[in-house]
Amino acid sequence: MPPRQSSRLKKVIADTTANISAPANGTSKAKAIKSKIAEEDDKDESSAAVEEPKSSKKRKADKIEDEEEDQAEDEPVAEKPKDGKKPKTAAKANTEDLMALAKRTIIDTLKKSMYIGAHVSSAGGVHNSVNNAVHIGANAFALFLKSQRKWANPPIAPEAVDGFRSLSKQHKFEVHKHCLPHGSYLVNLAQAEKEKADQAYSSFLDDLQRCESLGIKLYNFHPGNTNGDSRSAAIGRIATQLNKAHKATSTVITVLENMAGQGNVIGSKFEDLRDIIELVEDKSRVGVCIDTCHAFAAGYDLRAPEAFEDTMSKFNSIVGAEYLKAFHINDSKAPFASHRDVHANIGTGFLGLRAFHNVMNHAAFQGMPMVLETPIDRKGPDGKSVEDKQVWADEIKLLESLIGMDPESDEFKALDNRLQAEGASERSKIQDQVDRKSAKDAKKAAPKKAAPKKRGKKKAAASDEESE
């Protein structure tokens, strides 16, 4: 992929340059191009508030877009009128000129009905997420429904709601089936402190209500963090909040995401998900999203066909097949059972292409939204990092191509080898970090040896004479 990404990136920038004129407010054309290319949604799927220890906050900050800090996603901002024409909204300007990076595949042409997409930007208004999904050739998509940096957010603008519904209909997206919004990283439903728990619940409920206004029926979220409390007590609080939210809404299925297993995070074991679901009163309102990277990092193998079948058998027996509603499709830069959540591009990580062949050819997964959260940041001509959406467009086609492909064929083996070679340096770097940490932890855990007793000079001399 990298050999082609550079040329693709130039094409994206060239197309963007051709379609953007300098704004009337004096902003430079270069800034307009940067704004066009750099959107908000980077999806390395762990949370500083829930999944990662505090030392990882800097890494997590890279995932959440600068655009969200100063302007709510759902609030369109009017441009300055030109030549007496009716002003366009900034939201419309951000998406109307997008050239499709890939055509959407007609599902009926696939050997299995797999709905694959990515977590796209909703900057400027939730309706823009539909155009952004079309832009990469997606048949499913995820989005944030509001800013991830703030607790308080304005409601979705009526024109954004109407735009989302009309664009979904225009592009034939069944958003009640194949749209999977992601919950706020700030929210921890396991929170014990009342004031913080109420704040988390209010934000969570607000998202569910936004879903219902848009006709969305699946809502993905991270279960929560014990913050040092007992796991059973934290799970009880999550279920209590879900039951309350279900009673305050009517249609949305709250979808628990499995986690990688760092610190006090809940959800890395299938048993955690089972225990939450057992306490939910309305079982029709709860489900699970399997993140492939998280599962692998938590110790659930998906690589060999036998390992994949064993993992899914465990899920079905512990949680229940009927609760599986969606997937986050990510490779892993970190090795198996490392409990590190580091997403890699498809086929380049420790999971490898065979794992995704298993997923794409499993008949029981048909009809579910499958959302990429793989990294798309690439170095631009000026050396600065920009988002190359062509990566997602290519990965969607790659995953679709695996459906029905013979894994023993020369085509598959060549593709697998090429992708593994592309990710070799990253895998080696993370493996080294994991190995060094394991060695350090083992050293700490090892019992200390008692220091040898010092012998007196006379006794030592006598002992030396005996040895001679």
Image (cartoon, rainbow, N blue to C red):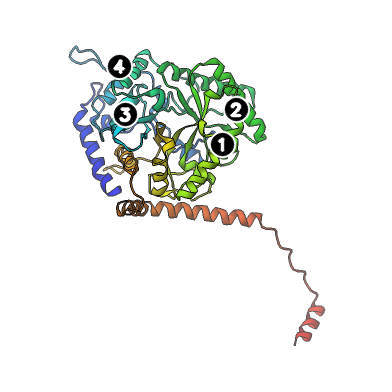
Dots 3 and 4: beta carbons under 8 Å?
A: no
Q: Relative to 255, is 425 above or below?
A: below
Question: Can residue 267 be seen in the rendering of this structure?
Answer: yes
Residue receiving disc 1: 267
- Mark 1–mark 4 Cα distance, whole angstroms, equals 43 Å
What's the CA distance linking mark 1 and mark 3? 30 Å
Q: Earlier in the sequence, mark 3 or mark 4?
A: 4
Q: Determine the residue positioned at 43% across, 52% down.
A: 427
| Element marked by disc 4 | loop
Q: Which mark is residue 132?
A: 3
| First in residue order: circle 1 vs circle 4 | 4
In-front residue for pair 444/222: 222
Q: State the SS at label 2.
A: helix
Query: Which mark is first along the chain, 3 or 2?
Result: 3
Nearer the N terminus, badge 4 or badge 2? Answer: 4
Mark closest to the chain's N terminus, 1 or 2:
2
Dot 2 corresponds to which residue?
A: 238
Q: Are marks 2 and 3 in contact (CB under 8 Å)?
A: no
Q: Position of residue 82 (x, y in %)?
A: 20, 16
The numbered dot on residue 78 is: 4
Residue 306 pos. (x, y %): 48, 49
Q: Identify the element where label 3 is drawn.
A: helix
Measure the alpha-carbon separation of dots 4 and 2: 41 Å
The residues bearing labels 2 and 3 have C-alpha atoms spaced at a distance of 33 Å
Judge whether residue 137 can be spotted in this image.
no
Q: Does 421 sit above or below residue 289?
A: below
Earlier in the chain: of badge 1 and badge 3, it is: 3
Q: Give the class, few, some or many, for how many residues have Cα within 10 Å of label 1's Cα (few <14, many ≥20).
A: many
